[in-house]
Image (cartoon, coloured by chain):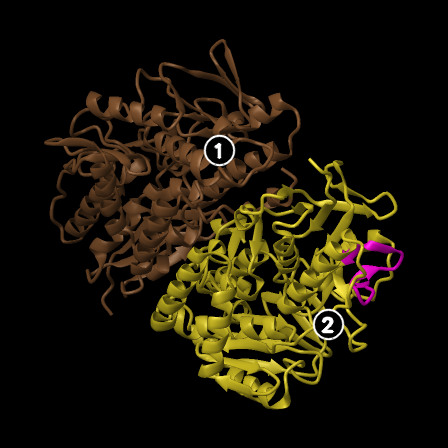
Chain colours: A yellow, B brown
């Protein structure tokens, strides 16, 4: 057997999988490493957090996705550090892995703007565990409110603060408002779920800052119609178990969710490459790092400044396109050809607000409302990995849409036993 | 408003829900208390443990199930003790609840035959959390085997011991065998999943002791065809992290599952009523307890000896029928009529072995194979609470049956990060 180069891909998200795709039937040996056994379709994660979909509907085992790639093996393991000099990866359990080429697609996690102590009170939404934790806290708040006899404390339990007015914050706020007003309406005896107070806090001048003015206005109006209290130009200065401080104002809220800052996974710091403030690697135009043409960084772990001078958004399209280019560059290097520059093609962006309500910006056209919602639905459904997932999600959504039922309202984990 | 008696039902399993059903539109005020917010359809729990169904497919929020019962409120809370003298329940968080009539439907949990230290190494299957923990351990064992280079340790990781040859043990063994031989077959590179060794250990003379001889033989043969190593008349004498002792024989198995003993929930001990060895209350013929005609015990929390002198099996039918009778007796007492004796009508029993393979015993007829499997499927599907659950389960099952795919193979929780 001829010796072929060994490519290691770190991360099984959109970046890692799209890189793996390019290597199928190519003369390379690939190892795909992830600390989890499953790929998560992140755009639908908020649906798990708000009890419409099950974790299994939006996640697939990585092994299953790449089962037909005969030149690829999948390993479950967490990367501790990368030694670019020795071309070696050390895993958390001490195991070592050598590579000829490396693609780092480790993504991003939450950043609390220098306040790591807020993490405990305001969970973010990046993994299935995060989504289940948010679901648990939201549902438990209603249960505790039903048992609470003091009206002030009851209202604190029915107050939800969502920090960050990007797409994730908007999706959480809109869906939670619908759940309170429609789904849970008839099920409680001591509380009126219409008294639920959902506050969406955005520090910048407007929610959904990456969208054009027209769509921002439409979104704000849709959220307000759902009863969401939208606070723009409002900075969160403190978070604790009882609520948040919005400058001088204290908002008593027993549930706080974090949809604001992100930071690249800490693995990037071990590469010895220049990073931006969020820990993202400042990559070369071909996505390699300075001094190491065999190491490529893709997706949320990288800051792509070469094209426009500004970082690209942290969306699936950027991860997929950059991963594809990095994989092509690996194949070009292995054939002793020069690498090529990564050029991002913006295919547009969308955000969902609630049932039958979304916004879409495709550059040449912009629209909102039911049409945007259907567009969002179909584009995301057809990107779902796995036939079963697509079917299951379509069905669950259809039923939720018609009946207002959110069937996955399960409080599981430690708190499920009435001991929050 | 006329004062009506207050009935407290403790537990939202089959017993609690069937009692609640009887009280709808009756002149009573009902409080349904559970430490979880959801009812679990226990007969399908093994399908969650073996990655075919999602927790949301077999569980429904209790509030949603009883949303139309206007005389009923649902409370999330864990019972600490019951004071039958004062007619008062104390919850784990200190709250107190008075009742006029009480129905205890707290069910059963695992019992390790005086070896509580085994619990850590051999999880049982009673709750959704249990099912997810079993799923996590099973899937993680294959992942670790793929990374293991020592052949002895690799085989230990591929060895699964299941303790207890009742329906749950048989279902777990059969489904796990199918998963190893079919579902996972093409996805691993370093291990051959056909080398998976599944050992089903039963201390008694035969597996499925409650079934007639003919069906026991058929089950044993089906399991053996699937490659399950069936060990009858074999007692487990020790369990630790590395495996189990079967008398003098040591079986090195990194995954051990418990499907043997059960014990009534510890709440029964606070009633001051006579208990059997498994902690079940020895109820009167009308399901009340001695000295307290207003307290009724139903389902797995009770030992019903009055009918045949032997306890009834711990199945859903017993819970539902006893709960119904207890509720009727509460209504009779509130109308100053005498209570009636509980008579159990055995509607038959079934167990599933694998894909297209089950056994059914309806007394007047007994059969096994594909027909029994279909019978099992339809009887259980139609008992599922919630239209969506029925549809979702049917679809997931159909796809799993045709494709051999088990789509919910997610390792979640702490161990999901490659750190078992």
**Residue A316 coordinates in the image, percent (x, y):** 62, 66
Picture quarter containing residue B203?
top left
Picture residue at 42% right of the left edge, 70% below the top: A191
| Mark carried by residue A363 | none
Task: Residue A290: say if magenta.
Answer: yes
Q: CA distance from mark 1 to mark 2?
A: 52 Å
Location of residue B329 with respect to A383 vertically, above or below = above
- Among all residues in the image, which is located at the extreme top? B248
Picture quarter containing residue A76?
top right
Residue underneath mark 2: A343
| Helix, strand or loop at mark 1 | loop
Location of residue A138 with respect to A101 vertically, above or below = below
Image check: A366 left or right of B335?
Answer: right
Part of the protein shown in magenta: A280-296
Mark whose residue sits in front, 1 or 2: 2
Picture residue at 47% right of the left edge, 11% below the top: B247
**Residue B79 coordinates in the image, percent (x, y):** 42, 46
Protein chain holding label 2:
A
Picture residue at 51% right of the left edge, 68% below the top: A380
Picture quarter containing residue B205?
top left
Protein chain holding label 1:
B
State which quarter of the image contains the N terminus of chain A. Answer: top right
Q: Nearer the viewer, residue B139 or B258?
A: B139
Image check: B229 left or right of B356?
Answer: right
**Residue A190 coordinates in the image, percent (x, y):** 40, 67
Judge the density around disc 1: few (<14), some (14-19), many (≥20) Cα neighbours within 10 Å.
some
Q: Nearer the viewer, residue B294 or B206?
A: B206
Residue underneath mark 1: B123
């Amino acid at each position: 057997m001829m010796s072929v180069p060994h490519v290691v891909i770190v991360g099984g998200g959109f970046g890692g999988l799209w890189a793996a795709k390019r290597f199928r039937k190519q003369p390379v040996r690939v190892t795909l490493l992830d600390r989890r056994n499953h790929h998560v379709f992140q755009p639908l994660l908020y649906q798990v957090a708000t009890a419409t979909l099950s974790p299994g509907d939006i996640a697939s085992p990585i092994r299953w996705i790449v089962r037909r790639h005969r030149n690829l093996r999948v390993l479950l393991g967490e990367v501790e550090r990368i030694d670019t000099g020795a071309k070696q990866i050390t895993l958390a359990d001490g195991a070592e892995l050598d590579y000829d080429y490396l693609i780092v697609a480790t993504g991003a996690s939450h950043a609390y703007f220098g306040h790591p102590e807020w993490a405990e009170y305001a969970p973010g939404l990046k993994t299935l565990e995060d989504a289940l934790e948010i679901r648990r806290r939201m549902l438990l708040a209603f249960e505790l409110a039903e048992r609470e006899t003091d009206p002030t404390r009851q209202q604190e339990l029915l107050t939800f603060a969502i920090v960050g007015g990007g797409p994730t914050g908007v999706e959480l706020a809109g869906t939670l408002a619908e759940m309170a007003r429609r789904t849970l309406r008839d099920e409680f005896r001591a509380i009126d779920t219409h008294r639920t107070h959902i506050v969406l806090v955005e520090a910048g001048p407007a929610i959904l800052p990456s969208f054009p003015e027209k769509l921002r206005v439409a979104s704000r109006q849709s959220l307000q119609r759902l009863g969401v209290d939208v606070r723009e130009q409002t900075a969160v200065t403190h978070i604790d178990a009882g609520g948040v401080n919005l400058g001088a104002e204290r908002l008593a809220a027993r549930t706080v969710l974090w949809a604001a800052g992100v930071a690249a996974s800490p693995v990037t710091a071990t590469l010895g490459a220049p990073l931006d403030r969020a820990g993202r690697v400042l990559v070369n135009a071909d996505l390699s790092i300075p001094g190491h043409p065999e190491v490529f960084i893709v997706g949320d772990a990288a800051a792509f400044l070469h094209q426009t001078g500004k970082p690209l958004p942290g969306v699936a399209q950027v991860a997929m396109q950059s991963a594809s280019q990095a994989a092509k560059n690996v194949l070009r290097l292995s054939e002793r050809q020069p690498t090529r520059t990564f050029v991002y093609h913006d295919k547009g962006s969308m955000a969902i607000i609630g049932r039958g309500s979304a916004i879409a910006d495709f550059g040449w056209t912009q629209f909102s409302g039911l049409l945007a919602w259907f567009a969002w639905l179909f584009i995301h459904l057809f990107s779902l990995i796995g036939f079963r997932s697509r079917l299951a999600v379509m069905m669950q959504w259809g039923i939720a849409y018609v009946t207002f039922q959110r069937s996955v309202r399960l409080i599981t984990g430690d708190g499920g036993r009435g001991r929050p």
